[in-house]
Amino acid sequence: MRAEDLLTLEREERRKRLQWSVVIRYLVITIVTLLSWVGSQFGASFFLPGILFAVAMALGVNLAFSYLYSLKNIHLGWAYAGVLVDMLIITTIVHFTGGITSVFLPLYLLQIVGTNVHFSKLAGPLNFLVGTISFVGLYLLERQGWLLHYTPFDVAPDLHTNVAYVAATGITLVTLMAVSTYRSGYVVRSLQKLETELAKANEDLVKANRAYQLSNQRLKDLDRMKTEFISVASHQLRTPLSGIKWALKMLMDHDAGPITENQADLLKKSYQSNERMIALINDLLDVSRIEEGRFTYVFREQELTPLVVELVDEMRHLAQPKQVSIVYEDAAKHLPLVNLDAQKFRLALQNLIDNAVKYTPATGTVIIRTYEDRGSVVTSIQDTGVGIPAEQQNHVFTKFFRGDNVMRMQTEGTGLGLFIARSVVQQHKGRIWFESHEGRGTTFYILLPATRPAVADQQDHFTHFVQSY
C-alpha cells in the first residue's frame, strides 16, 4: 500500500470517527432528556427549562458539526472546538441538575473516554483540563452565589455546602477523569501503534505479492517458451528420424543389395534406437499438446472390451522376447458402455501395459482385467515387477518421473507415459490410481463412468418386454 493510500485511509477513518461522535452526542441528548423527565416523575426537582436549554444548545451544535463532518476536507480545529463546546454543554447540564450533587457527573468521564477514542492523543488531556476547570469553576461560582444552586432532592438540600462531601466528590471525580484520560489514551495509542505495524506489514505483503506475481508470470512465460520449444524441436526432429527409419528398413530388407550378418545386426540395433527416438519425440509432442490444450478428443459411446482385447493381442508379441506373460481376464461377457476416444484411451492403456512389461523381470506375469464396479467400468493392469518405492509414489504421475530402482534396472525411458495416461483418463472424466509394493509388483486402475448398460443387457430387456406383451 502506497504512502498516499495510507493517508487517504487515515483521513477516511478520522471522518468516520467524527461522524460517529455526532451519533454518540444524539444518544447522550436522548438519555439526558429521558432521565430528567423520569426523575421529575419520581419527585426530583430538576430545573427542566435549563435542561431543555442545554439540550437545545447540544442539538444545534450537533447539527452544525454533522454538516461540517460531511465536508470533504475537515480542519482538525473544528474537532477541538467541538470538544470544548461539549464540555461547556455538560457543565450546563450538571449545573441545572444539582451541580456538585448532580447525577450527571459521569458525563465528564464519558466525554473524556469518547474524546480519546475518536480524536487525537492531544484531545484527551485538553478535554481533561477543560473539564476540570469547568467543574471547579461551576462549583466556585455556585459557592460564591454568583450562580444559583439547584437542589433536585429534598433529602439533603445543604449537601453541596458540606466540605467533606464536596472534597470527596471533587477529588474522586477529578482523579477518575485523570485516570480515564490516561488509560483510554494508552489503549488508543496502543491500537494506533498496532495499526501502524499492521499497515507496514500489509505494505510488505503487497510488495511480496507483487514480486511473487512477477516471478509467477516469468515462470509461466518460461514454461510456455519451453513448451513451444519442445513442440517445434519435436516436429523438426520427427521428419529426419522418419527418413532414417525407412532408410534403415530398406537396408534391412535388402532393397539396396545383400548385407552381411554383422551388418544386419548393426542395422537392427540402429533401427531399434531410432524407434526409441521416434517414441520419445511422439511423447514430447503429446505432452506439449496436452499443456497447450491442443490434445483434442472425439468421444463415442462404445464398449471397452474390444479395444482392450485388441491391444493385449498386440502387446503379447512385444513381451515375448522378455518371456513375460500377458494374461487378459474378462470378468463379464458384456460391460456397460462408456464415452470413449478410442485412439487416446488406447494410448493411455498402452503406456501402462508397456511399463508393466518393461519393469517386470523375465518369466513374470502381467494380468489385465476389465470389470464393472458400481456403475463404472474398471480396467486393472497388474504386474509382478519391481514396484515403486514408497517414498517416491507421490511423484508417479509427474513429468519425467522414473523410480530409482527402475533407472538402475533399465536406463531407457522418458518418464512421460504415466503423465500422458493420467491426462487422458481425466479428460474421459475418469480416475486413475495404483497400489504398489517394492519388490512385489504394481497394479494400476482406471475407472471410467458408464453411460448405460451393456448392449446385450438392453437387448435381453427388450426381448423380455416383447415376450411379456
Image: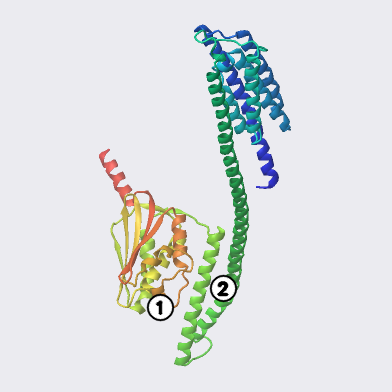
> Residue drawn 42% across and 76% down?
407
Q: Nearer the viewer, residue 431 or 113?
A: 113
Left or right: residue 224 compared with residue 436: right
Q: Which residue is mark 2?
A: 238
Mark 2 surroundings: few (<14), some (14-19) or many (≥20) residues within 10 A: some
Q: Position of residue 46 (x, y in %)?
A: 57, 9
User: 69 or 234: nearer the eye?
Assistant: 69
What's under tag 2, amino acid-wise? Answer: Arg
Whether residue 303 appears in this view of the structure is no
Q: Are marks 2 and 1 in contact (CB under 8 Å)?
A: no
Q: Position of residue 241 (x, y in %)?
A: 55, 77
Q: Which mark is residue 408?
A: 1
Secondary structure, mark 2, is helix
Residue 309 seen in this snapshot:
yes
Mark found first going from the N terminus, 2 or 1: 2
The count of marks equals: 2
Distance from Cα at disc 2 to Cα at disc 1: 29 Å
Q: Amino acid at mark 1?
A: Arg
User: From the viewer's perspective, is 152 left or right of 356?
Assistant: right
From the top left corner, tell me how far across and down residue 181 is, in percent. Answer: 59, 32
Q: Quadrant of residue 256?
A: bottom right
